[in-house]
Amino acid sequence: MNAPNQQLIHDLVKQEFSSRQAALLQDVSAAITKALKSNQHVVLVTGQGKSESDSRGWKLLLIVIPVLLTAVMGFSVWYAQNKLSNDITSNAQAITTRYVLAQEYKKEQFRAYQQIFMRLSALENTTAAANRGSGTKHDAIAAMDDLDEELRSAEFFLSTDMHKALDNASLQARSLSPINPNGSTKLQELMQQIADVKGKIRHEASGEIGPSNK
């Protein structure tokens, strides 16, 4: 084969190779472009899926949050009602206990007033008898001792005014001239003091068992 033919064949092969090389490059470029476009499409689809997932999450939250809020509010209301009920029960029990104790106190106070009233009447009778000479000094002193003993045992149930009035009555009785030679109290003064104390007892006792007349 001569040199011109070899050159021609070489040129044809080179041209064919160049042509195919360009086509190959074009195909590769097209494939890459397509792949990029396809990848971008996938990314968009993936983003859409994520958005749909987020949307479902929000929808779930919108369902769950009201339920949780309702549960919390329900528990809060139940707790408040339960606490209020317990407070009312505790207060009712405390009021009942105080009422029972107050009633027992008033009952004991009324009984103490009754005993003191009886002791005053005994003192009134014995001192009057001793003053007339129809009774003994011993009986009058015994009545005074009984009154003092009753005052000591009933002191817890006596008001300050009542205790003071009873002390004065006892002191006047012990300074009564027929009982105490050195005494200066007259029988009439003692009787008036005893009457005043009895009036106080009636007034306070009537307040314990019902409304007093004013």
Image (tube, rainbow, N blue to C red):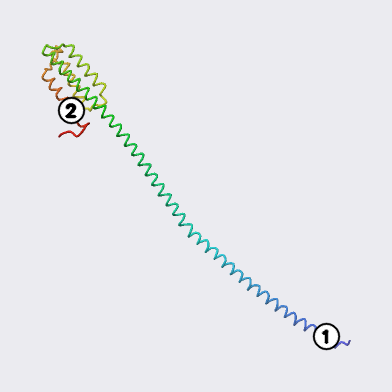
Alpha-carbon distance for marks 1 and 2?
152 Å
- Label number found at residue 9: 1
Q: Tell me which corner region of the image, top left, top right, bottom left or bottom right, holds residue 167.
A: top left
Q: Residue at x 13, y 20 (%)?
A: 191
Q: Which residue is drawn at 24% across and 20% down?
A: 150
Mark 2 residue type: Arg
Position of the C terminus by quadrant: top left
The residue labelled by disc 2 is: 202
Nearer to me, 163 or 4: 163
Which is closer to the viewer, label 1 or label 2?
Answer: 2
Q: In this view, does 169 lie to the left or right of 61?
A: left
Q: Which of the marked residues, 1 or 2, is nearer the chain's N terminus?
A: 1
Residue 51 horizontal/vertical position (percent) = 54, 65
Above/below status of 198 relative to 210: above
Residue 11 horizontal/vertical position (percent) = 80, 85
Mark 1 residue type: Ile
Residue 58 horizontal/vertical position (percent) = 50, 61
What secondary structure is marked by label 2? helix
